[in-house]
Image (cartoon, helix red, strand yellow):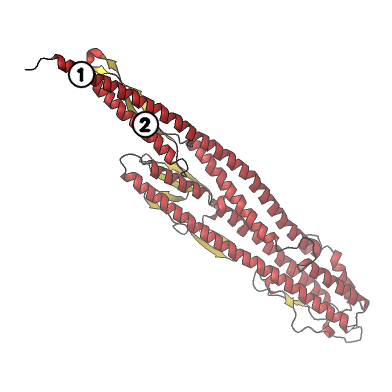
Amino acid sequence: MSNLLAMLGSSGNALDVYQQALNVVQNNVNNAATPGYARQSLNLAAQPLDVAAGLAGGVAAAGLDNSRDQYVEEQVQRQTQALGQFTAQAQATGTLQSLFDASGNSGVPAALSTLYQSFSAWSVTPSDPTARQNVIDSAATLASDVQSLSQSLSQNSQQLDSGIASTTAQINSIAAQIQAYNVQRLTESTPDPGVDAQLHSALDSLSQLTNFSTVTQNDGTVTVLLGGGSPLVVGQQQYALSTSSSQTGAQILDSQGNDITSQITSGQLGGMLDVRNRVLSSMTGTLNQFATTLADTVNQTLESGTVSSDPGAAAGAPLFTYDNSTPGAAAATLAVNPAMTAAQLAPVDASGNSNGNANQLAALANTPLTQLGGVSLTQYFGQLASSIGNENQTATNNQQSQQQVVAQATTLLNQVSGVSLDEEAVNVLQFQRSYQAAAQVLTILNTLADSVLNLIPPL
């Protein structure tokens, strides 16, 4: 009779185990589309069978496992970080590229060409007031276009600064979520699959924004470190980031105010920082060099001559002005000398040639200048325009290639950790049949127990 009772208990326990297994399958199905969720499975273990010792065998639940693969997840996060970087670079450089007319029929290239043409026309009729005025007007248009481009670059810098600050705020928000999940984990007696899914979903979102690494501690909490090792989340503590910007660039500061910009190398934040601090800074410096070289070269030529060939003729006046007392302000302040009149333009060079200065200025179109590395003003500005085009093309190509890499990594992750509804349907049938079999055994054992009890005569 004792063995029969043991078998009844074993069968009843089997019903409970298979019900747990069915619950796990149902939870998988319910969370098939939940971001960060990893497929779970209930381990089943055979119980020892020894009739003499009263051990009736059966099955027992041996713990819950999930299919999360840390290596594959880290691969997806790293590839997502790179995609975020390339996407941000492609978007930002695309905006900058739109500031330049590839045809050269508008903006600075067209205005520079018009100025050269006015110099040439002036060299033919150096005393003609109309030709002189055309030079002044063409110079004013060019200066205005340079100022406009400088202003556009400045606006792009401000927009990137705003984007960097906004992205940093998003990072802090996600870090706060991770910190909250860590607190929940410390209060759980058993791991909650829901909290685990939310935590990994938050890490996936963070990987779009910046580069980081994670360490899972023995207590179940996750430590998040930025690329250079600066902590973002450690246990129950969050370390918020902040931003700082100036004319020269943007900075990311840790919770102590230290500059950790160099640690942010990928993700959307890394991409924006690269364009802001490297690409835009280079473009701004190039445009300022263009403006100072243009103004200084033209002014030096004009000031070295005279307004006419007459004895005692007045020296020429500078055509351009710019603020040379503020670093990096040349392009933003380039303008035509407000005191300049047509009569003050000096066509006569120092040797007395009546159109020497005008010819020299017209020749600037093809004159290599040492200040520009041995290229002309036209070529120098062309290099500026082509450089941003190359930056955008490289970023766009990287983005397109990285999209495929992320797709492949995500497919692998889904194969390893994702929920297959087909597999879960098979598991449901398997555990339902096992449950039904255990229930049938329990029914038979119960009938046997009744029969045995009926054999015992009443007292």
Q: Residue furthest top?
A: 52
Q: Residues within 10 Å of mark 1 (few under 14, many from 20)?
A: some
On the rendered image, what quadrant is the C terminus found in? top left
Q: Which residue is mark 1?
A: 449
In which quadrant is the N terminus drawn?
top left
Q: Which residue is mark 2?
A: 21
- In front of the other: 145 or 262: 145
Secondary structure, mark 2, is: helix
Which residue sits at x=70%, y=57%?
A: 388
- Which quadrant of the figure has residue 95? bottom right
Specify the amino acid type for callout 2: Ala
Left/right of residue 421 with respect to residue 303 in the rendered view: left
Residue 228 seen anywhere in this rendered image of the structure: no
Apparent side of residue 274 relative to residue 259 in the rendered image (left or right): right
Residue 283: name its quadrant. bottom right
Closer to us: 145 or 446 = 446
Residue 451 on image: x %, y %: 19, 16
Q: Quadrant of residue 337?
A: bottom right
Looking at the image, residue 117 sits to the left or right of residue 102; the answer is: right
Q: Residue at x 41, y 52 (%)?
A: 177
Residue shown at 65% from the left, 46% from the top: 400
Q: Specify few, some or many for label 2: CA neighbours under 10 Å numbering under 14, 14-19, or 20 or more.
A: many
Q: Is residue 227 above or below residue 108?
A: above
Classify 408 as above or below 396: above
- Measured as percent of width and height from the top left, residue 321 is found at 73, 77
Q: Where in the figure is residue 24, as x and y percent of width and height?
A: 38, 35
The amino acid type of the residue labelled 1 equals Ala
Report x, y in % for residue 252: 52, 58
Secondary structure beneath dot 1 equals: helix
Q: Nearer the viewer, mark 2 or mark 1?
A: 1
In three-dimensional space, the C-alpha distance between marks 2 and 1, rounded to whole angstroms, equals 28 Å
